[in-house]
Each structure stands twice: as structure tokens, then as C-alpha cells.
Amino acid sequence: MALAIELIGITKRFPGVVANDHVELKVEEGEIHAICGENGAGKSTLMKVLYWMLQADEGTMNVFGQEVRFASPTEAIGAGIGMVHQHFMLADQLTVLENVILGAEPVHALGLIDFDEAKDHLKKVAESYGLFIDPDDLVEELEVGERQRVEIIKVLYRGAKILILDEPTAVLVPQEVEELFRNMRDLKKDGATILFIDHKLDEVLAIADTITVLRQGQSVATVKPDQVTAQDLAELMVGSELPTPETTESTVRDEVALEVSGLTVIDQDERVIVDDVSFRVRRGEVLGIAGVEGNGQTELIEAVIGTSPAARGIVTLNGADVTRATVRHRREQGIGYIPQDRHREGLLLPAPLWENAALGHQTQQPFSKGIWMDRQGARQRTEDIRREFDVRTPDVDVPAHALSGGNQQKLIVGREMMAEPSVLLAAHPTRGIDVGAQAAVWEDIKAARRAGMATLLVSADLDELIGLSDTIVVMLRGRIVATLDPATVTPRDLGAFMTGATSAGAA
Amino acid sequence: MKAIPLWKRASLLLAAPVAALIFSILMSSIVLVLSGSSPLRAYADMFEHASRLETMIDILNRATPLYIAGVAAAIGFRMNLFNIGVEGQYLLAAIVAAHLGAMVTLTPVLHVTFIMLVAMVVGAAYSGFAGLLKVTRGVNEVISTIMLNAIAISGLVAYLVRLWQAGGAIDPGSAQQVGTTPIPESGLLPDLNVVVEGLFRELRQGKELTGVLLVAILVGVGYHVLVNRTRFGFDLRASGINPFAANVGGVPPKRMVVAAMALSGAIAGLVGLSEIMHIGFFPANPIKGLGFTGIAVALLGRNHPLGIVFAALIFAFLDVSSGVLQFTGAASREIVVIMQGVIILAAVVAYEIARRAREKEEARAAAEAMVAV
Ligand SMILES: Nc1ncnc2c1ncn2[C@@H]1O[C@H](COP(=O)(O)OP(=O)(O)OP(=O)(O)O)[C@@H](O)[C@H]1O
Ligand SMILES: [Mg+2]
């Protein structure tokens, strides 16, 4: 088979880091090729080099047998290479159609945008690949899976023959992953070549034709999925064993740390997003919330941290009513928060790591003393986070955007865990974190749980949810529709509850 | 970032303003040639004049209020707030401070402090009102401050000047000027001529180096400490960088908007000091435009406490030079206005180019490139 892409000796350096170190990569035309590796191994960097968002320092690149040299992603697109980023880049206020054509608008003779022509073209593209979406929907109203579809259509619309997907499954629930994989197989049938990054090794084994493993910037192996197990892959990546989350003995105590009763959240359009939800989380307990994204989990968490107001109901923290309290007050009373979208709510991207480590804790030791910031204390704490949570960075003065996605996530997890919260609100805490580091984070959560931390866990990763939780509740259209025992429930059952296929009290 | 050598960082940082300056000199030269003047002669006159001690004093005296206005605007910019209202805030603050300052009898230090406090409170209240409108009614601060400017300048100040008018001035240099009742000596900041004369020589032409320069220095140091060393400054910057993350991080977004606007206004209130402390009262015909120029100064100085110093000096130099050009007849004084405008435009473009270059240098071109696709 012909090679769609061949990378020879690609090297890319950043200040203090060699992100890609003479990487070799061969991708055959029409295959699905997975890239695996630890956080910071250089996967995203390699993909950006391939897409010419970054210029390699050394090495050559052949596309369909021709050596190429582009000036920008625009030219890469022209040559048939398209990329969907891990952090979506859509304009919320525009429609699907407008987002798709942005920057590639077909123009009338008069210089006006030809929307009819664009819509026809979009429909043709979408239909031929079996990607269904209404071109007139506003992007802000779409679910994550749909947004991702828009990103993919956007790339296909520009005629991409080679698709790069950076961690496409990280934000999806299992049903959506299946849907995405179906789409990927269809695309492949139509002759497209797909490169994708994924930390979930069973997914990789299920869909990839070929797998390339990166370790510390180098390409260490290229394997076929039928020759390896997930265990082998993990060893290739990190040189350690593949961990499985399992619940240890219960550490649930009697005192209630967080109590929510009759909580109702109503959005600007007067829609009921969280509908009369009640639950208790005791010290030492992990309460898992399962649900397809967009069923009120986000808003529930927001109401508990205090960023969206509760229309009705009461939030009690360690015995005190905090329903009307400010976010700062709740934080000072011991709520830790791992937001679902690290770029939007978790980080100050251009600011140094030590300032990022202070965010959310800036009124407390060791980040400040009275009205003054304690730069020394903050730096020291950041060093501690870096060491204990294995945040890979040259130093704590680099801006947060210089960290790889998984390392940014580890920084956030470390910042919240180091503050020893009494209640942790964790939305997808290990999203984008590699298998090795994921196990470490799970261990940290379990250790803190033993020490009495109460956790409210939202996760799209059902294994994580089942492995960590003491109790699981399922949210559907803003309501809690089932309470399940993680010891007996399977991911498949859980999926059925989440989509409303099964409805019952308890399993 | 540490890994990039210091000289490279410094040159990237300075490249933009220097390039903007060179570009605007080129543009002005073209305009000068087109209008039939000799650019070389005009520049020679400007620099020759500026090298005199007396002119330098003029430049410092003009840079002082521009610096304070620049810091006022910069505080807003740090939070992505566009306080266009510095102009109205300083004029209103100055007239109220001058009037109240003339009505009280206090010991010297207290008296000056009182006048400054009044100015800051008036500025803060007027600007904070725009902040309140934003968080309670969702009115964009650009619109509200523009309207508040109009109300302050052609409404309140014009009215108060007539209401509080006190016939004539005691200041010998401006005997025919009218304005508010003169502030007693105890309420005026002494000039800094002693310092200048100690360092250089006696000042001629009755020039005085304004004592408000000390206030400007304090404002600059205070601004640096506040933004970079205090919790409030951290909250301010965090809200400017990522309001969502700041909100989740416990920074109350609405309160921050009001606080930042009020603080910006408080500093704006000090801009007019250099006039009332100099002539001793608020004149019927005050110096206007310092607030608007201050916005440009903050822009050129990149909101940086030292950057604003250089920007204020450049604008003050150009302002003072416009008089020189008029005087020597080397060129029309309007050329200076053109230069100021071109500098700002060129600076905005140059900063953008430099930012891209820096991002490339730090290999962050990532997100930018997506926009282009
Ligand atoms: N813009 C940048 N500036 C400086 N260093 C960078 C930059 N982008 C990436 N790096 C560094 O390059 C290395 C590789 O990063 P990359 O984002 O490619 O990792 P990754 O394999 O995608 O990891 P993850 O699984 O966490 O997303 C990391 O050490 C990272 O800190
Ligand atoms: Mg990555």
C-alpha cells in the first residue's frame, strides 16, 4: 500500500524540552493509525508539526510520496491534511454552517457569501460520510459529541484526505465513542486516512490498524493491534504495568460533608436544568454522578461551587448552609474543584505555573499572607505539586500553555488535592491523563478519601466512575433517575440507565 | 520564560515601540515634505530645543499628568475594561478638589492630603458609577464613560466653574485668569526647583518643576506593587486573563469590575493636580485632553509601570515640541498631532507583530494559526 504520510527524523525543541526527537512515522493510505504515549511524550507536538502549526527544527515530511514544505496550516489543508484539536475551536455564537465555512466561504460574483451553495456543499459532505447535523443549529446549543462532529465536518468540508484527531474520545461517553468509531470506519471506507491520539488503550486496540508509540519524544515502536495487549502497550509507553481501578474497603463515615436538597437550577431561557436533586455525601465517601453530558451534571456542580445560582433548594457544607455564599467563601470552607474544561475554567494560560497553582487558593496559605501574595510560598508549593503529581515541566515559571494537555490537568489536580479539601468536586479529573498518571491520581483520591475527604465525581469514564465511587447516581434530563451500587453494576448497564433505555429505582 | 536569553527577551520587548517610533518618524517626514517643510530642520529644532534645561522641565511637567492618566487607563486595561472616562473624571475631580481645598484651613501636609483625597474620591465615585452600570444594567463601560464624559465636561464642570467662580487669581503669572477661589499656600505642593538647581543650574524664565511629579512617582510604584504583589492585583490580572477561571477561583466578577473602575477613577482624579497645584485654583479654561492622551500613553506603554513612563515622556516631548515648531516656523504645529496619532497606530500594529514573533519564539503559534484556517 502507498504511504499517505512519512515523517523522517522529525525533531522539535522547545525551551528546555525536546518534544520530538528524530521521530519516524509511516502512515499507510486508508488506515486508522493511533499514536500512544505518556503525557508530554510529544504526541500533540508531532501532530501540530504534521499540520504545520509548528515548524519542525529538523527532519523531512512526505505526503503521498512527495516531500512537502508548507508555510501554514492553510497550505496543509490545501494538500489534504486536516486537524481536529483536543480543545475545540468553534465560535459559540455562530451556527454550524457559519462555523464550518469560516475562512473558506464560497463567494458570489458580488462578493457576498453564498450561503446556499455552502449549505449544499456541507450537506453533501455530511451525508457522504454519514455525519448528521443541522447546519442551522447554534453551536452553543450543541452537545460535546455534536461539536466534535462539527469540527470533523469542518475539516472534511475543506477536502481533507488525511484527518488528525487529537484525543477525540476524551470528552465522549461510551455511546458517543462508538458513534465516533463508526464514523471513523466509514471515513476509512471512503478512502480517508486517520491519525488519532488516545490514552484509552482498549479503544486503541479496538479501532486502530496500526499503533505508533512515543516515549520521551522518540518513536519507540510501531505495532499491529493483534500482536499486542493493552498491557504490552502500557509497558511500551511507560515501562510499567497497566493499572486497573478497583474499590478498596469502604471508608465512609457518619458525618455528612455535603448535602444538597431539592436543588433546582433554571437557565436564562427559563428551562429547568437541574430538577429537584437531593443527595448526601459523607466524609470518606465518593458519590459518582453518571450521565450523558448535557443532562445537568455541569450545572449541578456549578450550583455547589457557587457559580450558578440555585433557583430552589439548599446546599449544606459541613453543616453550614452555603446556598447563598460566594464562591470564595465556599472555597475557603474547604471545597476543591477540578473543572471539566481545563482551558476555560481551570487555567490562566499565559501566566506562570506558580500563579496558576495559586488560582482558587489565593486567599490562603501558602499563596498569600494578608493582602500580600507570597511569591516564595507559592513557588515552593508549585514545586511540591510538580514533584508529587509528576507535572513534567522545565520549571515553575513557564506559562501554563507550554505544558502538554495531560500535564496541565495534573497541575490542576495537584493544586486542588494539595489544599486538602474537605469536599472535592471533580469533573472528569483524569481527562487527558495517561494510564500511569491516571492510576496515581486515583490513588491520591483514595488516600484523601481514607483521610475523610468527601468527593462528588462526574466522569465520562465509566471504569473510573465504577472503580472510585461508593455510590453512583444517574442523571437524566436534570433529575436523578437511579441510584446504583458500583460493586454490582457493569458499564453496559450504566450506559443503559444513562440514555434512559432502562428506567428503574435501583439495580 | 527562563529558557529564552535575556537579551532576546529585551530586544523582542523593545523592538515594537522602537519600530513604531521609527515608522512614525518616517510617516511624519513624508507629511512634512508634502507640506513643503524640511523634516530635518523641524526635527533639528525640536531636539535642539528639547536639550535645554527649561524645555526639559516643561516636558517633565507635561509628562507628569500624562503618566498618572496613563496608569489610570492601564488599571482598567489590566481587566479588559476600557475606561474612556479618565477625561471627565479628572476634570470633575479637579474642580471639586480645588473648590473644597480652598474652603478649609488645615496644616500644610494635611491640607494637601485632603485635596488629593477629595480628588480621588470624586474620580472613584464617577468612574465606579460606570462600573456599577455595567454590572447591574449590563451597560458597556465604553458607552457609559463616553456619556459620563459629556455630562462631566460640558455639563457639570462648565456649571461648577461658573457657580464657584471667584473673580480673579492671586497667582501673579496668570493675573487675568478666572477660576475657583485660590487654595491657600498650605494646600499647594511646593515645586521641586531646589532639586533641579542642586543638580544642574538655576532655572530661568520662571520655570518650576511641579511637585506633583512626586505624586506620579508614588502612583507608579503603588501601581506596580498593587498589580504584582497584592492579592487584589492577582485577582485583577486573573480576571483580565480569564474571567471564567477567575470566577471559579473565587474572584467575584462584579465586585472586581466596580473595584477596578473605581480605582482607575481614583487615579484619574489625581491627573488634574498638576494644574490646580501649579496655578492654585481650577481655571475657567483648564487643560483638556490629558485623559484621552492618557489612554494612548497606556497603550504605547503596554500597561507596564515603566513602559508608561517612556510613553508619557514621548507624548510630552511631542506636545512641547508643537509649540516650538510654531515658534521657529520650521513646520506647522499640527504635524505633532499627526505624529502622535501615527505612533499609536504604528505601536498597535508593531505590538501585534512583536507578539506573533514572540509567540513563534516561544513556539506558541498554535492557537493563532487555527484562526487563520
Ligand atoms: N508551546 C510550548 N512551549 C514550550 N514547551 C512546550 C510547548 N508545547 C509543548 N511543549 C512541551 O513539549 C513536550 C511535549 O508536549 P506535547 O503537548 O506534544 O505532549 P503530548 O504527548 O501531547 O502530551 P499529553 O498526552 O499530555 O497531551 C512537553 O514537555 C511540553 O511541556
Ligand atoms: Mg496532547
Image: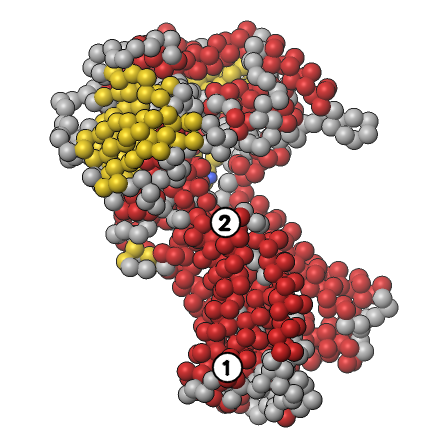
Mark 1 CB near ligand 1 (8 Å cut):
no
Q: State the SS at label 1.
A: helix
Q: Is residue B49 something that shows in the picture?
A: yes
Q: Nearer the viewer, residue A136 or B22?
A: A136
Tag 2 residue: B136
Q: Nearer the viewer, residue B271 or A300?
A: A300
Q: Could you confirm whether marks 1 and 2 are on the same chain?
A: yes
Sequence-first disc among 1 and 2 = 1
Q: Mark 1 points at which residue?
A: B101
Q: In this view, does A308 lie to the left or right of B163?
A: left
Question: Could you say which is closer to the camera, residue A41 or residue B371?
Answer: B371
Mark 2, Cα crowd under 10 Å, few <14 / some 14-19 / many 20+, is: few
Q: Can residue B305 be seen in this view?
A: no
Question: In x, y percent, where is residue B358?
Answer: 54, 47
Q: State left or right for residue A85 relative to residue A461.
A: right
What's the residue type where badge 1 is placed?
Gly
Residue at 19% across, 21% down: A247
What kind of residue is marked 2? Thr
User: Does residue A284 appear to the left or right of B61 in the view shown?
Assistant: left
- Which chain's residue wears label 1? B
Where residue A126 sits: x, y (%)? 60, 14
Judging from the image, mark 2 belongs to the subunit labelled B
> Which residue sits at x=19%, y=30%?
A282
> For residue B73, what is the image quadrant?
bottom right
Q: How far apart are marks 1 and 2 (CA)?
A: 34 Å
Q: Is residue B337 left or right of residue B300?
A: right
Which residue is at 37% across, 25% downward? A275
Q: Quadrant of residue A114?
A: top right
| Residue A121, percent from left and from top | 68, 17
Q: Count residues near mark 1 (Cα–Cα under 10 Å), then give few for <14, some for 14-19, many for 20+.
A: many
